[in-house]
Amino acid sequence: MTTITSSSKYAGLTAMLRHDLRRTRLMSALFFLLEFIALPLQLALLLFSRPERGFTLRTATYAQIYGNLSAVLFPMVIMLSAAVIAMQLMNYNFGRRSVDVYYALPFTRRQMILSHLIAGTLAISVPIVLNLAITAGLALVINPAVGLGWLAKDLLLWILVGYCVFISIMLTATLMGNAVDTVLYAGMLNLEPVLLFLAVLATLGSFVIGFDPSSLLNRNILYLHPIPMLITQIFSDTWVPLSGWAVGIWTVLIIGGTLLTVWFYSHRDAELAENVARDNWFRLILKITSSFLLATVFAYMIFAVITTGGIYRSPSEEMAFVLGSAAGAVIGYLVLEVIFGRGFKTVRGNWWICLADIVLAAGIALMAVTGLFGYETAVPSVASVEYAEVDGYLSRYYRSHSGLDIQNTVHFTDEKAIESLTQLHQSAIAAAQYQAAEGNPEYSTSARLRVVYHLYNGSTVTRSYYGLALPEDGAERFRDLYSTAEALEQKNPVMQIGKDEVRLGDITVMNLSGAETLVSDSQTERLLEAVRQDIFDTAAEKINQSGEPLIYLNIGYHYPMMEYYYDAALGKSVEHPAGEGSDSIQLPVYESFDTTLSLLGELGIEGKAFDPTDYIAVYGVYDHYDLWMDSATFRANSGLAYYWVGDYQVMGETYSGLADDPSTMELVDVEWSDTPSQPAGKLTAEEIQMLYDLSSPCGDGEDEYSNCLLLFDTGITDSDGRNHLMLIRFIPEETLRSLDTGLLERMTLSVETDADGQVYIGQNNALYLNNWPQANQD
């Protein structure tokens, strides 16, 4: 059909625009009302119901202008208005009679589509401008300090939000033959970039060892569609830094989408109206990508049925996912052809689309399970790394340090440290591959490792390994890395004193029996420096936990405390100084701490060898809560801490076991088959010495149940008399099972058998760590 051309292109455009504006004015008025309800009315109602807010609203725009409900409703109404107005303007293209009528008008196709674009943009923009103007007036009446600086930015960005939805539907409508397909494909066009990104990330994250989907997701989630970028800027009072590349690409795409809409409409075939079976490149792309999404969902359904739940996938799980992807692609093809072809008539003829679906879905699955072209095993060379960031641990033992800003991430710049890191990285890869193929090894240490290499060429390499079961050589490489000076400087709590306004307090020295000596204030700085030097030296030589502790240092420190409260005038939580807090760090001093021991000897403070007569009882517990852990070896330290006991446990003559509620404990006769001749916890000096020799001063840091704690009761109590100072040591459960049952009973332990016939040690007490000795901070 030949289009009649107007004698004046501007007159034709003007005439068509007047027609389009008349068509859209009522719809625009309706959405003005809806937007008014969504934003200005919400603010007015809030002020009416809570008039005091009128005098305390903060000057920040987001919380003042956009309340919680408005922040959701207003953008939803804008996007809905853009979709409805676009469909209203293009609806005639979906009927053959209306197409013939419109295409017979004395306007060029270019004039018609330009008129549609201008009229639609105005119909979307005018309600936004009017409602924001009303909102600005309300805000100025409420609080003149809010000003109008936010208005121009928000006007432009809200209009762009609407235009992004509008142009996507206009572009789709020029390529579709009916309204249903236009809505479906426009929805796919807007959603599929996000869904495809998530599907690929999920596949790679599930099957590529070391792949870190969270890192890519956090960096790119804002940039997968322009609307999140725009709304992020609107709901912020300052400019949010965004990727220049992403902003540039989306700017080009929006402009390009507008130009393509004009071009496609100008060349649109009138016979396309009411056609539901005719494919074009646009339909094909979205069909294939939609089939990939359905294939991924189906593959995960199959995978979920057969998976063993391991973090690293076995070969059988990988094969099931690949086959599930291929089968899911066929199912997705059939479903989409039936939906978009309105039946089965196109299924056979479009067999090659099915083949493309299979190649895409199975190809991505194969890339993931085969290591993503060497991604799994790639480790940067030491010479290429400028610095690295590492976040990891060998065990879950940790004790928080009040007031010390110890970060999880450690920064490494030293070449030797980076070399140690690359060796650890290779061990982590090998361990993960072994776990995938064979499962967890019999003897291993649980670990987590996340590393980010920053290369000299400006790029980064990120790898993450969760749920690792490292063999001993891998665990030692972990300890090697965290024993470097850079790691100690950032992770060891003793090194944090003097940083960030944390100042040194008193230091007390405790020998193994709990006797405590206060170090003179004039010598505490010297002692702290001696301790730091020994930590560096012994960590480098890997002897920081060798031998037996001779003494324990309680190193006190003071730190600034902050109070947080909600400031109604500012509309946010704020902090302000709230004085000082204090805490202490307990550090075991081994015979390898030469500098520290020398200085203590100079001060007349000597350690004392273990003497079993210094202890009145020994108990066994499994609770590893709140123990100190060495930051270099990731092994729990022994120590001297106050445990809740109660006098009846060590002073009475009989024992029935500790009740769950300590306040209800009473002394009753024991009903053991062979009643101990001594009260609970009471052992002979020989038995105490034997238990000391069988135990060790540090835990293995692998499993909280791999070692039982032996508590050697010094008999020293705190102010309330119910907390006893205990020397903490570690003993394997296997060793406990070899001891005499009568001895175990007096240690409040027993040999039990579970439902599967497995023998284990049962804890028959409710002892718990109440507090650590605090250096005198008065």
Image (cartoon, helix red, strand yellow):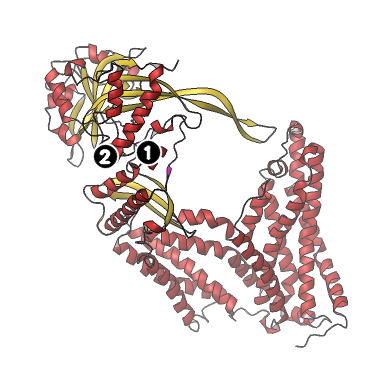
Left or right, residue 561 beside residue 171:
left
| x and y, in percent, of residue 196 in the image | 51, 64
* Magenta segment main secondary structure: loop
Whether residue 684 is visible:
no
Residue drawn at 50 percent across, 82 percent down: 350
| x and y, in percent, of residue 549 in the image | 24, 27
Nearer the observer, 30 or 713: 713
Secondary element type, mark 1: helix
Left or right, residue 764 beside residue 92:
left
- Which residue lies under the disc numbered 1? 488
Secondary element type, mark 2: loop
- Which residue lies under the disc numbered 2? 542
Left or right, residue 344 beside residue 698:
right
Magenta span includes 719 = no
Which residues are the magenta region? Answer: 394-412
Mark 2 or 1 closer to N-term? 1
Local packing at callout 1 (Cα closer than 10 Å; few below 14, some 14-19, many 20+) is many
Q: Is residue 752 above or below residue 165?
A: above
Nearer the observer, 496 or 132: 496
Residue drawn at 79 percent across, 63 percent down: 122
For badge 1, the amino acid type reads Leu
Local packing at callout 2 (Cα closer than 10 Å; few below 14, some 14-19, many 20+) is some
Asked whether disc 2 touches disc 1, contact meaning CB atoms under 8 Å apart, the reply is: no
